[in-house]
Image (cartoon, rainbow, N blue to C red):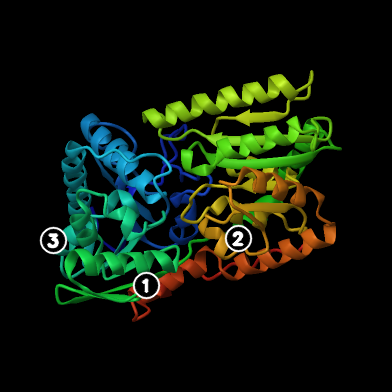
Amino acid sequence: MRQSSLVVVANRLPLDDNAAPDGACEWRRSPGGLASALHAILEQTPATWVGWGGGVGVAPVLPDIGTLRLRPVSLSEDELRGYYEGFANSTLWPLYHDAVETPVFDRGWWETYRSVNRRFAEAAAEVAEPGAAVWVQDYHLQLVPQLLRELRPDLLIGFFMHVPFPPPELFMQLPRRVELVRGMLGADLVGFQREQAAHNLAQLAVKLLGAEGADDKILVGGRVVRTGAFPVSIDVAEMESLSARPYVRNQARQLRHDLGAHKKVLLSVDRLDYTKGIEHRLTAYSELLRDGRVKVRDMVMVQVAVPSRERVESYRGLRDRIEREVGRINGEYGRVGEPAIHYLNQPFDRADLAALYQTADVMVVTPLRDGMNLVAKEFVAARADDTGALVLSEFAGAAAELQDAFLVNPHDVDGLKETLLQALDAEPADLARRMSAMRAHITSHDIHAWARAYLTSLDQTGRLARHLPRQRKTLARS
């Protein structure tokens, strides 16, 4: 394989799970996912992406997607269980999300995680040209920066943590905490969504490695590792353009008709994950119905829960609980032809998502903990007419930027109920002011600004940022 001056290393290749009829690869665009975030950057920037293709066994040779070359990494069935389902998603994921679900510590998983991380590092070393920049993504691959540095000390190595990074009190529970911190600090620049995460890493580096730490740089092993907050964003212009398409607008009008033109529509779009607060949200809505504060004749909820990690037991249990609760609420409060909740446990393409975003009166984004939550930003970008309300968890990274949302503590069900009612009853002028302010923010802090900020900080010569597309002009307001 040819070598590249920019290499992205992530757990998954950005491929749709369903191949095109002619066998060509298509970009994977899940709601709020990493592939969606990087799509706008890499669609015009020559690069190589190293990642797992989603299958088990020998990885196939894959064609390019435009200017992006793909370097698949193979996983066996045992590695999938130990590295991905095990250490990454049953140990690190719950711990990094405030231990919402109890983390599982399995010694065998660690060995598999380390072995797979080495395979990713070796693949990146193979495809990176001399002096290239390698951008490693997220908690699945925390050991890769140091492993890659040992293999290719000539490389410029960046690491970005998309999920929250926990305080030392939680992180110290990890049996392999020293190796994980050392792995991240193999990078030249470690980026996070929030400044607090950089502070947490500095504290851990001092405590576990005897480093000299500050919130913006850490001196360890004779090297300076820079750290910082780089809140990830979306391609605002792309979502605005998509939302303006006649098909999408017609679909939104049809959805409004089907849901009930006179009804208020609550919408949530999540991956099916216990961190997303879906159960708390259903409880709040159910109690509002029970107490007669909202009525099915006037209100409907649409909950999209995109399937996720279906082989992990805790996720299967979550799906069963949600489906039972939706059935109970519809059974108690629904009427013939008028369910209280429309529950959709299926993937959605981006055009249909854009139509849903335009249909909602209130978008409810209430994760218990989230690194950022790009769905919140997508909703704002889709509302070119400055209508609609966003109810947003204080514990989503997006809350630091979208201060004009209706912010809420999702653990407080009573507070969530009151905030939903506040958003439903808000005056149009107040909603327009809030939405206009949020749209202005995400327009100036879009995905291009994020990539430029991170890559300029990683390579201070400006070489990398020169190859990035400029911010696209957004559409005029409708």
Q: Is label 1 in a helix, a strand or a loop?
A: helix
- Tell me if residue 467 comes above or below residue 18 in the rendering: below
**Label 2 belongs to which residue?**
236
Residue drawn 55% across the image and 31% down it: 346
- Distance from the alpha carbon under mark 2 to that under mark 3: 38 Å
Instruction: Inspect the image, locate mark 1, and give the three-letter code of the amino acid beneath it.
Output: Leu
Q: Secondary structure at mark 2?
A: helix
Of the 4 image quadrants, the one containing the C terminus is bottom right
Residue 326, image quadrant: top right
Which numbered disc covers residue 456? Answer: none
**Left or right: where does residue 5 sit relative to residue 446?**
left
Residue where numbered disc 3 is placed: 151
Q: Is residue 127 visible?
A: no
Image coordinates for residue 293, horizontal then vertical, percent: 79, 38
Residue 35 location (% of width, % of height) = 44, 50
Q: Position of residue 245 (x, y in %)?
A: 71, 49
Amino acid at the residue labelled 3: Leu
Q: Tell me what residue is drawn at x 39 percent, y 45 percent.
A: 99
463, above or below 40, in the image: below
Could you say which is closer to the camera, residue 216 or residue 162?
A: 216
Q: Nearer the viewer, residue 80 or 398?
A: 398
Mark before the other along the chain sequence, 2 or 3 = 3
